[in-house]
């Protein structure tokens, strides 16, 4: 096995870690994404908003 020596540049900014939604919230998010997809309204921007926590299910 080889040790990987990976270093990040000094100016690298790590994205903040997001809290993992509860199982109930995860189910609501999946249901909302499926609804949007079925309606033809799911865009990469909407998906990104859900994945980053910028948008929550209604």
Image: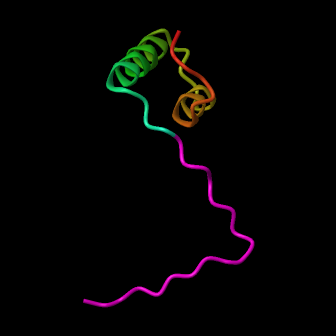
Q: Residue furthest right?
A: 11
26 lies left or right of 46: left
49 lies left or right of 13: left
- Residue under the image location 43 percent in, 37 percent down: 20
Looking at the rendered structure, the number of numbered marks drawn on it comes to: 0
- Magenta stretch: give its range: 1-18
- Residue under the image location 75 percent in, 72 percent down: 11
Q: Position of residue 24 (x, y in %)?
A: 34, 19
Please tell me whether residue 51 belongs to the stretch shown in magenta. Answer: no
**Residue 34 is drawn in which quadrant?**
top left
- Residue under the image location 43 percent in, 11 percent down: 35
The answer to whether 12 is drawn above or below residue 27 in the figure is: below
- Residue under the image location 43 percent in, 21 percent down: 29
Q: Position of residue 13 (x, y in %)?
A: 69, 62
**Residue 44 is drawn in which quadrant?**
top right
The answer to whether 4 is drawn above or below residue 32 in the figure is: below
Please tell me whether residue 16 belongs to the stretch shown in magenta. Answer: yes
The answer to whether 33 is drawn above or below residue 8 in the figure is: above
Of the pair 7 and 21, the residue shown nearer to us: 21
User: What type of secondary structure mainly makes up the magenta span?
Assistant: loop
Question: Which color scheme does this rendered protein use?
Answer: rainbow
Give the position of the N terminus as an image quadrant.
bottom left
44 lies left or right of 12: left
């Amino acid at each position: 096995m080889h040790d990987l020596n990976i270093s990040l540049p000094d100016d690298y900014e790590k994205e903040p870690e997001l809290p993992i939604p509860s199982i109930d919230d995860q189910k609501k998010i999946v249901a909302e994404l499926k609804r949007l997809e079925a309606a033809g309204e799911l865009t990469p921007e909407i998906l990104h908003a859900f994945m980053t926590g910028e948008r929550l299910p209604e």
